[in-house]
Amino acid sequence: MAQSKQAIKNRIRSINATKKITSAMELLANVKLQKHRNLMSKNSEYALVLKNTLGNIVASNPDIENKFIVKRTSDRHLVFVFSSDLGLCGGYNSNMMKTLESIRADEIILVGTHQYSWLVNRGYNVINDMVSSDSVNFNDLKRLANIAIEKYLNNEIGHIEVVYTKFINTVSFNSEVVELLPLADNNIKPSNVETLFEPDCDTILNDLVPMMVHNLLYSLLLETKTSEQASRRLAMENATDNATELNDKLVLAYNQARQSAITQEITEIIGGADAL
């Protein structure tokens, strides 16, 4: 019985230590969640303005044959994939990998180190070196986007897509796919306001489309990072709650074992006294 009590006591000590870690990670994830959520809100407005401006130009000039509008003859797909650098974030990474497996991905640009080995070991063609999603900045992402745009213009690929996690609220986020190029009517919101463009639409599109790709890609990364922290906060909250519940059960079991040991000792004392 003493060994049983000691084993339970050791488990209680171990669970309490784990609970401190998960509780601390929950608080840290909550702080990062608020930070990324603010960045996401600010940047998404700018990306939306660029997207709407582009839609206005295309809608006002339906016959324009810009290099970013004309579809490529290549049918190869290049896919940006955003993953985390660390684990312990629930189904965040696995859900994105399931989405990736459901689409065509001839080439992959991966941002985030956690899933690099997973993709390489399964035969995916990851064309870039490992990039940390926690430390990547706009210029880093712009450089990666320019690689994809150059491949698109050289007709090495015909589609540029992004697998990201859409942030709905702090407990709800879904893995989705967005196509960046070629430009499609279903992801353009034209304006009804008549606008004059200088110097000409083709020149403006040559500058505006890469700018939109850069900023939309960065906006999707921020939204994904917000979802990652929300998923990690939720996972750590659940882990902390489970640790608390298990600790309560073990404390009860320890008290029962202790009470049984005391009862047994009293019984033995009484039995010894009767024998005398």
Image: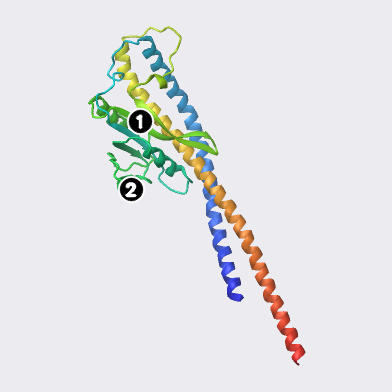
Residue 81 in the figure: left or right of residue 31: left
State which quarter of the image contains the C terminus.
Answer: bottom right
State which quarter of the image contains the N terminus.
Answer: bottom right
Residue 161 is marked as 1
State yes or no: discs 1 and 2 in contact (Cβ < 8 Å).
no
Residue at image position (27%, 27%) is 152
Residue at image position (53%, 57%) is 18
Residue at image position (44%, 48%) is 87
Residue 27 in picture, x, y percent from top left: 55, 46
Q: Quadrant of residue 218?
A: top left
Within-10-Å neighbours for mark 2: few <14, some 14–19, many 20+: few
Q: Is residue 28 above or below residue 192?
A: below
Helix, strand or loop at mark 2: helix
Q: Quadrant of residue 145?
A: top left
Disc 1 and disc 2: Cα gap in Å? 21 Å
Helix, strand or loop at mark 1: strand
Residue 219 in the figure: left or right of residue 260: left
Residue 200 is marked as none
Name the residue tied to disc 2: 117
Residue type of the residue flagged with mark 2: Ser
Q: Is residue 215 above or below residue 233?
A: above
Residue 217 shows in this picture: yes
Within-10-Å neighbours for mark 1: few <14, some 14–19, many 20+: many
Residue 272 in picture, x, y percent from top left: 73, 88
Residue at image position (75%, 91%) is 275
The number of numbered discs placed on residues in the rendered structure image is 2
